[in-house]
Amino acid sequence: MRMVYKVVYVEDQDAGSVLKDLKRFGLEPIHCKPITFAETVSCINGSNPDLILMDYKLLEGGGETDAPALAQSFRSQGVEDASLSIPIVLLSNNSKMQNFYKDFTSNDLFDFSINKEKFHQNLDKYTTLMKELIESYKEIKERIVNKQSVLDLLEIPDNLIENIDPRIVDFLKSVNSDSTYQVSGFILDKIVKPIGVLIGEDVLTARLGVSKGSVDWNDLLQKFEQYRYKGVYSGAYKRWWAEGIQYWWRHELQQSLHLRRLSAEEKLIILKEQFPEIELERVEGDASSVTRKFWTICHHSYIPIDPSEAFEKKNILSEVPWVEPEYYSYDSVCDNDLFQQLSEIDKERFKALAKGY
């Protein structure tokens, strides 16, 4: 990645702290205070930015335009000419921003949103993601302009291609005229972020039955390094190919039983037999689990859980089929008022279980 990237920050209030933080993490920030729509667009274009960062509300400082209108202008520009596409990120203190963000992502406006407090607490993560957005947009734009498939951007290991959901492959192979934003959003929001084709470190510990606090956890990760995700956005999101972990288990460790069918204790015994030189500890998952066959994580507490013992969140009809459902542990539902978020079937199952306690 390039060392310095230009980021225009559109903010009608004091921008000092954000500009300072962006600069500390290798970005070149430029402040554009919104006035009229035309003047604000001119300020942004004149800065020749690699990424636009916008505040949620732009009218409180006397300006005459808002974030959605500005974002729509630049998105339209990118649709007409893919080479002009640019990442647009939303930043705000507003507690209602997430609903606002969800409303407008459906209209292809923002790549992602950040609460200012979380931004300042996780500067390395979010500035890394901004840099990756910039670089990924460039790679995607080049492929779209040259009528090339963007599938290679995922860097799928050769021996896993046939095991990846064919709808993902078909979509990415066929893209040659869609917007850069849509391709980037598909990869980031439908492949990299959710649990499905790729899994993060917390889910990985659940599936292997090993605590990531183990002394030699990183040594274990090296055993299947070839299945670590190395495609776009892998710098900001540490992921592994879910099928790759199972392939490694079955073919390289020569285990006939699927990981899903074994308890954490059983998996740990196998791994210790295979790798006696490394020190591993069993993962501590949901305390109420009977099977100890952890496979995913509670989406509230992030502890490992067995989906058959957990409670499924209501299905989002627009969700893609390869993304796994979200689950909550019993304790998380009890302690955090999550009952209304459960599927109707699991509401009944939860009530029946609660009566037994």
Image (cartoon, helix red, strand yellow):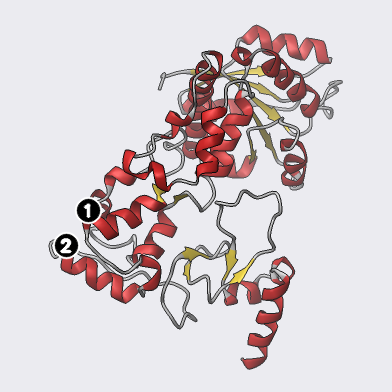
Name above or below for residue 206 compared with residue 21.
Answer: below
- Name the residue type under label 2: Phe
Name above or below for residue 247 compared with residue 151.
Answer: below
The residue located at (73%, 43%) in the rendering is 102
The quadrant where residue 18 appears: top right
Residue located beneath label 2 in the image: 275
Residue 301: x, y in percent?
A: 54, 65
Q: Is residue 146 left or right of residue 228?
A: right
Residue 109: x, y in percent?
A: 72, 30
Which labelled disc corresponds to residue 312?
Answer: none
Q: CA distance from mark 2 to mark 1?
A: 10 Å
Viewer-side residue, 15 vs 142: 142
Among numbered discs 2 and 1, the one appearing first in the sequence? 1
Name above or below for residue 61 compared with residue 47.
Answer: below
* Label 1 element class: helix
Residue located beneath label 1 in the image: 219
- In the current view of this chain or complex, which residue is farthest to the left? 277
The residue located at (68%, 32%) in the rendering is 110
- Name the residue type under label 1: Asp
The quadrant where residue 53 appears: top right
In the rendered structure, are the residues bearing label 2 and label 1 in contact, judged by CB atoms less than 8 Å apart?
yes
Residue 273: x, y in percent?
A: 16, 69
The residue located at (42%, 38%) in the rendering is 234
2 or 1: mark nearer the eye: 2
